[in-house]
Image (cartoon, rainbow, N blue to C red):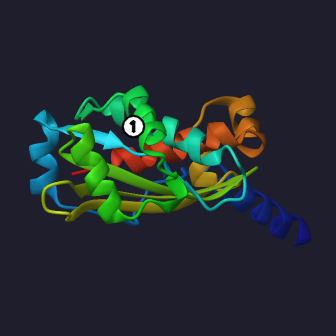
Amino acid sequence: MNKIVFVGILSLTILNGCAAVTPYRVTNFFVDKTAIAELHTQRVAVLPFQNSSGDYPAGAKVTDEFNLQLGKLGEFVLVERLRIEELYKEQDFDPNRIDQDTAVKIGKMLGAHDVILGNVLEYSKGKIGVSVRLVNVETGKQIWQARDTLYAGDRRVKVLVDGFWQKMRLKSDKEFLAQILCQLLAQTFVEK
């Protein structure tokens, strides 16, 4: 009788391990679909993200990655990063002290229709947290926002990458995990 119970438990364990895992999706977001649809011909500026993580270069790294992932969507005309950096230096703007009203003014200076503001909340091995929002420069209205934290050990995150080494890389490479999170956040713009 004990052999039958053991075989049954072993079978259930194997079946559970082989069960399909649903890939991770960002669900903590809102989007004004009408306003986003109008952005296809408008310029969007991704402003340098605030950094609340305690990891000094995290703000710049995640800003660049989010800008890249947003560009890959092919949905927006992005203001050149160099132009934004030059304006920040010229005006002596500190990314950690930019509020929404100042961001709107910066967007106008850049000739952008909308600006993206972000904050890196967590940037450590195995855990990345980011909050981002898009604000219309003319109205000051927020038309998109997303926030999430990825954990490298989450099975739903692991199925997003291929192979053993990439799964291991999730745990040890903060930039790789940030790349995945930025891609997921950017995808919320185009989700149906």
* Mark 1 Cα shell of 10 Å, populated few (<14), some (14-19), many (≥20): some
Examine the rendered structure and indicate whether residue 90 appears above or below residue 137: above
Question: Which image quarter holds the N terminus?
Answer: bottom right
* Nearest to the observer: residue 181 or residue 91: 91
Q: Residue furthest bottom?
A: 1
Examine the rendered structure and indicate whether residue 71 appears above or below residue 35: above
x and y, in percent, of residue 112 in the image: 22, 41
* Nearest to the observer: residue 160 or residue 75: 75
* Nearest to the observer: residue 164 or residue 113: 113
Question: Is residue 180 visible to the viewer in this orientation of the structure?
Answer: yes
Q: Amino acid at mark 1?
A: Leu
Question: Is residue 189 visible to the viewer in this orientation of the structure?
Answer: no
99 sits left or right of 65 in the view = left
130 sits left or right of 76 in the view = right
x and y, in percent, of residue 108 in the image: 21, 46
155 sits left or right of 95 in the view = right
Picture mark count? 1
Examine the rendered structure and indicate whether residue 156 appears above or below residue 141: above
108 sits left or right of 55 in the view = left
Q: What residue is rendered at 72% in x and 52% in y?
A: 55
x and y, in percent, of residue 8 in the image: 75, 64
Q: Quadrant of residue 71?
A: top left
x and y, in percent, of residue 23 in the image: 49, 49
* Nearest to the observer: residue 1 or residue 90: 90
The residue singled out by tag 1 in the image is 87
Q: What residue is rendered at 54% in x and 50% in y?
A: 20
Q: Quadrant of residue 159?
A: top right
User: Dot 1 lies on which element?
Assistant: helix
Q: What residue is rendered at 76% in x and 38% in y?
A: 168
Q: Quadrant of residue 46?
A: top left
Q: What residue is rendered at 67% in x and 59% in y?
A: 53
